[in-house]
Every structure is written in C-alpha cells, then in structure tokens.
Image (spheres, rainbow, N blue to C red):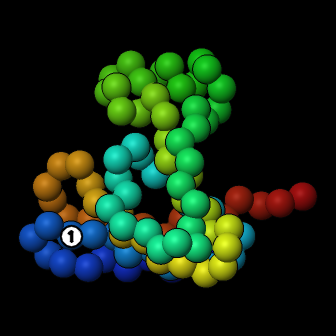
Amino acid sequence: MAQFTVTGDIDPFLHVSLLRGEKIYCESNAMVMMESALELKGKMTGGLGSALMRGLPMANRFFQQHIEATDGDGDCLLSPTLPGAIQILELAQPATG
C-alpha cells in the first residue's frame, strides 16, 4: 500500500512512496518530483461527462494525473496549488466481492 507523509510546514509537500504496480491519482500540475521508476500520465477519468463536470468549476480538473510505479518502487512529491497545510486522511478500502 502506498505510504503518504507530509514534509515541511510553511509550503508543505506530500511525499508518496509507491511499490511496483501501485498507482495514485492527483490533480493536474500537482507533481513536483518523481523517480525514474514511476510513470506519469494525464487522463480524462470517468468518461467525457464526468470530466466535463469536474472541468466546469476549474479548468485544471478536466484531466487527472496518474502516477504509477511501473519499473519498480519509487517516490514522488506532490504540492497543493494554493498555500496552506496538508492533512492526511485515512479512508476505508471499498469491499471487494
């Protein structure tokens, strides 16, 4: 499972450690740095209708970034577009079945 830690107080970064095969989704332009084992792709997630609904309030939400550990384990740094604190929230995994 991907590991998330916050680095810095004034202008924080979200440090993400991914194991091979893991993938995260983030807003466009959030990625600051990534290791060469990771692959960055921009996609329209959820189909055209969902992408348009996300894109109406803010133009940068039309596409989402996908960061995937394709060539091994790797780390990346993400940054918010607006200044402020970052808080990590633990969410329950959806039931499979």
Expressed as whole percent of the image width and height from the top left, the position of residue 32 reads 32, 62
Q: Is residue 39 visible?
A: yes
Q: From this viewpoint, which residue is outermost toward the left?
A: 10
Q: Amino acid at mark 1?
A: Pro
User: For mark 1, does the 10 Å Cα neighbourhood hold few (<14), some (14 to 19), or many (20 or more) residues?
Assistant: some
Compared across the picture, whether 2 is left or right of 34 comes to: right
Q: Quadrant of residue 58?
A: top left
Quadrant containing the C terminus is bottom right
Expressed as whole percent of the image width and height from the top left, the position of residue 83 reads 14, 55
Task: Identify which residue, 77 or 46, lies in the foreground.
Answer: 77
Q: Residue at x 14, y 76 (%)?
A: 9
Compared across the picture, whether 31 is left or right of 74 comes to: left
Q: Residue at x 41, y 46 (%)?
A: 27
Expressed as whole percent of the image width and height from the top left, the position of residue 24 reads 56, 60
Q: Residue at x 37, y 58 (%)?
A: 31
Task: Identify which residue, 33 or 80, lies in the foreground.
Answer: 33
Q: Is residue 94 above or below residue 60?
A: below
Q: Is residue 58 above or below residue 27?
A: above
Task: Identify the element where label 1 is drawn.
Answer: loop
Q: Is residue 22 visible?
A: no
Q: Residue at x 9, y 70 (%)?
A: 10
Q: Quadrant of residue 71?
A: bottom right
Residue bearing the label numbered 1: 12
Expressed as whole percent of the image width and height from the top left, the position of residue 20 reads 68, 76
